[in-house]
Image (cartoon, grey):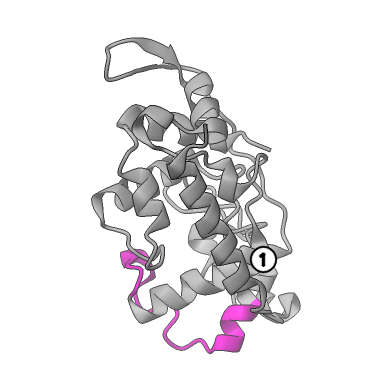
Amino acid sequence: MNNPIRSMFFSLGLLSTALFTNTVFAGDAAEGAKLVAACSACHGGDGNSPVAMFPKLAGQGEKYLVKQMMDVKSGARSIPQMAGQLDNLSQTDLENIAAFYASKNTQLSGSKDAKVQLNSGAQVSSLDLGAKVYRAGNQESSVPACSGCHSPTGVGNAPAGFPRLSGQHADYIAKQLRDFRAGNRTNDGDAMIMRGVAQHMSDAEIDAVANFIAGLN
């Protein structure tokens, strides 16, 4: 029997793909390299941030990066550390920066195997739980599989604007999921796809899937 929640998110994914596929960015990576000096302090010279609280941008899709920068610039996504950083950059500048980071290779953060405690009190392997949620979701709590939008290997869906997750810092992923769950991050569109996913996730599931993603490739 089909899971209606999973079917709904699959349909939304197809709709998002149709809406974003026709958007073509023609960023120039060489020009972008001239604009990222200030970004390097937090995100690393090649987009592989050495600090877990700052996301890796290397290998990320251009559409996703441009959207996030536009959202930060407009205030639709609030990141205090980036306040004012993009104000003087044009649309072309943002596209060039996105092209630069998209051209780089993501370095894996790596996963750790530890025990996590479920709401039932049972302890399970963090990697096992993370893999289960990422690949199959949790039908009992209506959490769809992350792989449906972000691909089985975590590379995302660049034409649709779905971000790459593979190798991202676990701490960063966990914070974003908690921010979506709490409604502190709201730039996932009118369909509220990520808020809809995160609201059904437990702390143990969030931490486990974030840890699994850090080593996914």
Say above or below: 86 vs 112.
below
Question: In the shown orientation, is residue 96 left or right of residue 77?
Answer: right
Q: Residue at x 73, y 64 (%)?
A: 103
- Looking at the image, which residue is at 26% across and 56% down? 183
What is the three-letter code of the residue carrying label 1? Answer: Pro
Image quarter (top left, top right, bottom left or bottom right) of the C terminus: top right
- The spot of residue 16 in percent (x, y) is 55, 65
In this view, the residue in front, 77 or 29, is 77
Q: Is residue 161 visible?
A: no
- The x, y position of residue 58, in whole percent, is 64, 57
**Image: magenta residue range:** 76-96
Quadrant of the image occupied by residue 200: top left
In the image, what residue occupies the spot 35% across and 44% down? 198
Q: Residues within 10 Å of mark 1 (few under 14, many from 20)?
A: many
On the image, the x and y values in percent for residue 71 come to 41, 74
Q: Is residue 58 above or below residue 33?
A: above
Residue lying furthest front? 1
Q: Secondary structure at mark 1?
A: helix
> Which residue position is annotated with label 1?
159
